[in-house]
Amino acid sequence: MNSATIKKLFPFFNAGASTHPKPIYVDNAATTHKPQSVLDSIINFYTHQNANIHRGLYDLGEGATVLYEQARQKVAQFIHAKKNEEIIFTSGTTHGINFVAQTWGKQHIKKGDIILLSQAEHHANLLPWQQLAHETGAILDFITVDPVTYMFVDPLEKLSSRVKLVAITHESNVIGSIWQSESYLADFIAQAHQCGAHVLLDSAQRVSHQSINVQKLNADFLVFSGHKMYGPTGIGVLYIKEALHSHIPPYQKGGGMVHAVSYHHATWAPAPHKFEAGTPPIASAIGLGAAIDFLQPHLTVPDLALHEQNLTTLLIHYLNQNDTITILGQAHHNAHDQHLVSFSVNNVHAHDLASFLGTQGIAVRAGHLCAQPLINTLGLESVTRISFGIYNTIDDVVALCTAIDTGITLLQRLKS
Ligand code: PMP
């Protein structure tokens, strides 16, 4: 895979071609840049194809409907769903998780039931369950993260007949890969089902790095965001296994999701429409379809995962040369496919380092990364995170590491 050639497909990196230093963007776990093909698909839609969907009985409206439903089909194929109807368009991962908590969760979770999460959840997969637990009297329990190996500690031991839902990250936005393997995760899900639990997977950090097979995993719900996989913001996916459709009420009510309405009653259209009230983000869904067209060829062969692993290995090699840096989960990073590294530095606040790197045209993330309980459990308040994407190059890593060294020396000198 030639990442330098791929970078040329992204207008963001060409727009400031004459500026120096060239931007180095290594905050891909937060959001990714968009290739020209995604931008074109959106501009083309608004220029030539714009109409509402599932409503207009004219060519333009029917054409827009076809494009939107084709995007759904692309997503279904992308995650190997059995049916297109299992794909619900949302505004993002956060929306998808709140959707499940407030619909399926409210109907099926009762006082004393256990909702099993992990210590490594993003706030998006913690706060909706905290709210549901407060509303229902359910209990939250957490699979622990081993502070040395950074893997989950005996997840199976947390399963029991009281666990009604396991809502868990597919990959951590702080420490990356966290499951020993995809087949281990599938076994865990099978065991959760044996205990009578349903399983929601937060795949926000997985989806742009490895291909997902939701049928093999056999998750009941799976969520991700378009903007972290080279698609637009404002569009996300909630996969709901078909067998559950009739057990889940609509999240929101309005146009486009009814079978019949009288002044006092309404019946719902079948899924996915009953779950998509109102005018959906049509252009963004089409843009997500274009992002899948762009990304999928790199996921079906392991070249992207390999490329990102190589960049990560090189980054770790550099960071290890500075003994004031502590990498979160060093051993863990050596053993698994990785695309992100979080670290802390003696006597240097992560925000100061990130601000310094910002002045050098380098975008990294710093803080508690919306995973404050995990960061605190690890005895920290904040970390700096480098996360790679398809367009990052070895040159990016070299320039980044030089800037990190300079920044740390400068900031440590200011403190001494
Ligand atoms: N889960 C994980 C693991 C994430 O990394 C993120 C975004 N950082 C989210 C959920 C929330 O995604 P969004 O803000 O797109 O809804």
Image (cartoon, rainbow, N blue to C red):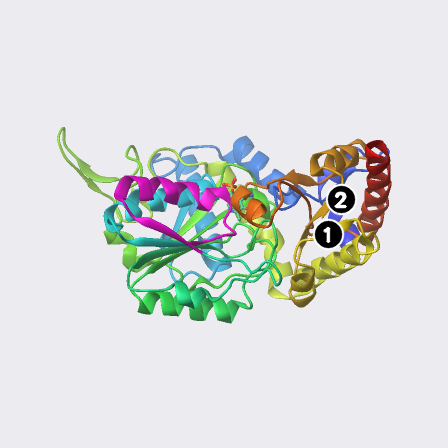
108 versus 146 height, above or below: above
* Image coords of residue 176 (percent x, y): 61, 55
- As measured in the structure, the alpha-carbon distance from the residue carrying label 2 to the one carrying label 1 is 8 Å
Residue at label 2?
A: 346
* Quadrant that contains the C terminus: top right
115 to the left or right of 269? right
Asked whether residue 1 is in view, the answer is no
Q: Amino acid at mark 1?
A: Thr
- Quarter of the figure with residue 330: bottom right
Q: Name the secondary structure under disc 1.
A: strand
Of residues 252 and 343, the one nearer the viewer is 343
Q: Is residue 19 magenta-colored?
A: no
Work out which residue is located at the far front of the displayed protein and give it.
Answer: 416
- Quarter of the figure with residue 42: top right
Residue located at (24% from left, 48% from top): 111
* Image coords of residue 185 (percent x, y): 48, 66
Residue at label 1?
A: 326
50 to the left or right of 130? right
Determine whether label 2 and label 1 are within 8 Å by CB.
yes
Q: Which residues are magenta?
A: 117-142
* Quadrant that contains the N terminus: bottom right
Sequence order check, earlier mark of 2 and 1: 1
